[in-house]
Amino acid sequence: MRNEDKWRFLLAGVSNMCGATATNPLDVVKIRMQLENELTRQKGLDVYRNRYYEGVIKGGIQIFKDEGFRGLYKGLLPSVMREALYSGIRLGAYEPIKVLLGAKDKAHTPLWKKICAGAVSGVIGSSIATPTDLVKVRMQACTHGHLAGDKTPRYKNTYSAFGEIIRKEGVKGLYVGVGPTVKRAAILTATQIPSYDHTKHTILNLKWMDEGPLLHIISSMVAGFMAALTTSPVDVVKTRIMNQKYERKKHYLLSELFDYL
């Protein structure tokens, strides 16, 4: 492996670990809102009229009221671990895989090669990082909150979570939801990185802007919007499956798929 590729993996992991730390409160709110519909439906309540987390801002305020500042940073350690593996691999491997597909000219690489490279690197990264993603979701999930009616934490900490899952559900328990996780990663990386890459080089080729921070910000905004748009349904399914124990996985997957058809 070239030194350039080693630095790409390292910097991708570190930068995304920093990003995960900064956005953890938003991730907690997202997880709670994704699971709230499930918990509300289980109690026979109207999904839309009995919301506890009403939007991102109100949801964050509600979590802060109920659980304090620490509540917004639940699952931080597994989240950082996940980004070190998942994003370090998917972003670090993107360029080498793109080159393997024959992309020699960065400024004029066909979009399909970028999409394929992104999908492959995303699948590899998510397959390896699934256990950390699972623990992150379960520690951030609203399984002991307002709707569940149980205020006992599901796991004491990150390491006890890994141990308890292995002890009660086996090693396979760490890979609950690996199917939708891999699908989400393939869609995300095939959308996000190529969108950024293609947007930046299109703007440069058209001479609308010069290389610089503003160009990177605009390209990142386009990539983020496209990624969120394409992955949201799969992300909800992934979160709900990961919040369930191993023995319920197959039944729950089928029910969720029917809900989205």
Image (cartoon, rainbow, N blue to C red):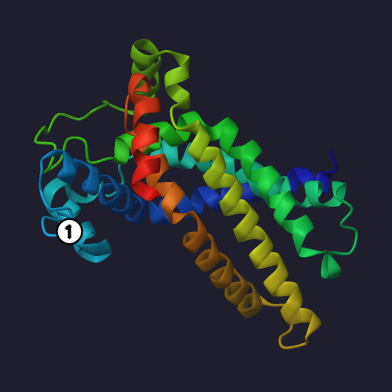
| Image position, residue 172 (x, y; %) | 47, 18
Q: Amino acid at mark 1?
A: Tyr
Frontmost residue, 30 versus 261:
261
| Crowd band around label 1 with a 10 angstrom C-alpha radius: few (<14), some (14–19), many (20+) | few
Q: Tell me which residue sits at (68%, 61%) in the image.
A: 194
Residue 96 in view (yes/no): yes
151 shown above or below 219: above
Q: Position of residue 149 (x, y in %)?
A: 9, 36
- Describe residue 35's horizontal placement relative to residue 146 as left or right: right
Q: Dot 1: what SS?
A: loop
Residue in the image at 34% along x and 37% along y: 255
Residue 2 quadrant: top right
- Report the number of discs: 1
Which residue of the protein is positioned furthest toward the bottom in this rendering?
Answer: 208
Query: What percent of the width, then of the height, locates residue 245?
Result: 33, 24
Give above or below for 53 relative to 222.
above
Q: Quick one: 142 or 4, which is closer to the camera?
A: 142
Q: Position of residue 250 (x, y in %)?
A: 40, 26
Q: Nearer the viewer, residue 76 or 145?
A: 145
> Residue 1 falls in which quadrant of the image?
top right
Residue at 35% from the left image edge and 27% from the top image edge = 251
Q: Residue at x 80, y 81 (%)?
A: 205
Q: Is residue 242 visible?
A: no
Can you identify the residue that label 1 sits on? 48
Q: Is residue 72 above or below residue 156?
A: below
Question: Is 161 positioned to the left or the right of 226 in the image?
Answer: left
